[in-house]
Image (tube, grey):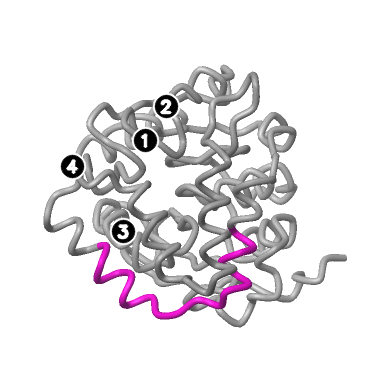
Amino acid sequence: MNATDNFTLGYSEYGDPNAKVLAVLPGWATDANFLKPIAELFKDEYRVLLIDMPGYGKSSHLKLFADSTRQTANLILNTLPKNSILMSWSLSTLACCRACAMDTNGKIDKYISVCGSPRFPADPNWPGFDYKYVLKCLKLFDEGKNTRSIKLFFMMQSQSSILSKENKQFMIESFDAMGDIDKDVLVAGLHKMAYADHREAFNAIKIPCLHIFGAKDRLVLPDLAKHLIQPPYHVCSVLQDSAHMPFLSEPENFKKVINLFLKKSN
C-alpha cells in the first residue's frame, strides 16, 4: 500500500483524445508550460499529456510527495492509461525510471528520456555534473534568493548561444506563467539531483527505451550515452546542435529521432 495509491497527477491535454498516449514530464523548477513545444510536435499523431510533477502546476496539491521518488513514480503509474509512451525531460527521469521498473500492469509501452540520467552527479566511472553547481543553488536558497537560484540553473541548462531569441522569450514567458513554487518542493528536487541514484531501477527496465542527449549539454553530459546503451532495450541518440533542451534547439531532428525509434520498436 502506497500513500499515493488514490491520487493522480494533474496534466494538460493536446491532440486526438482517442489516439495513443504520449505522456511527458518536466525537469526541475519547470511545469507543463515548458513542454508545450513537445505537444506541438506530436499532437497530430498522439494524445499528448503534459504532466505536472508533485508541487507544480496542476499537481501543486501533491507537494507533500515531492521529496519521494518512489511515491512520484507511483503517481505517474496511477495517471497513465495502459500502453502509454512515457517521456521524461531532465530531473523527472529519476521518477520515470522508477515508474518503468515498478510497472506490472502494462502502463508503459515505451520510454524516452531527454537529457536525463538515473544518476546526475559524476563518480569515478560515471559522467555527470560537478556537485558545486547544486551546492551553489542550495546556498542561494538558504539565503532566500530562490529566483536567482532558478535563473542560475536555467542559465547553466540553456546555453544562450544555442537557443534563438524566440526560444529565450518562450522560456521567460513559461517561467512567468508557472508562478511561484514552494521552496521545499524546489529544495527537494535539488537534493534528488545531488544524491539520488536509480541505476538499479534503470537496469531493471525491460521495454524499448530511447535516451536523447545534447552534444553541448553541460548538465547531463553526452558521454553518458556510452553507459546507457544496453541492447536490445536501450538505444541512444546525441543531437549535435543542442544542449539541455533539444526540443527547442533542434525540433525537427528531435521529432525525427523519436519517430524512427517508435517505428523500429513497434
| Disc nearer the start of the sequence (2/4) | 4
Q: Which residue is mark 4?
A: 161
First-in-chain label (3 vs 4) = 3
SS type, badge 2: helix
Amino acid type, mark 1: Asp
| Label 2 neighbour load within 10 Å: few <14, some 14-19, many 20+ | many
Q: Quadrant of residue 32?
A: bottom left
CB atoms of marks 3 and 4 within 8 Å: no
Between the C-alphas of marks 4 and 1, the distance is 12 Å
Apparent side of residue 152 relative to residue 112 in the rendered image (left or right): left
In percent of width and height, residue 85 lies at: 49, 48
Q: CA distance from mark 3 to mark 1?
A: 22 Å
Q: Which residues are the magenta region?
A: 171-189
| Three-letter amino acid code at the position of disc 4 | Ser
The residue wearing badge 3 is 39
Q: CA distance from mark 3 to mark 2?
A: 24 Å
**Which of marks 1 and 4 precedes in the sequence?**
4
Q: Are marks 2 and 1 in contact (CB under 8 Å)?
A: yes
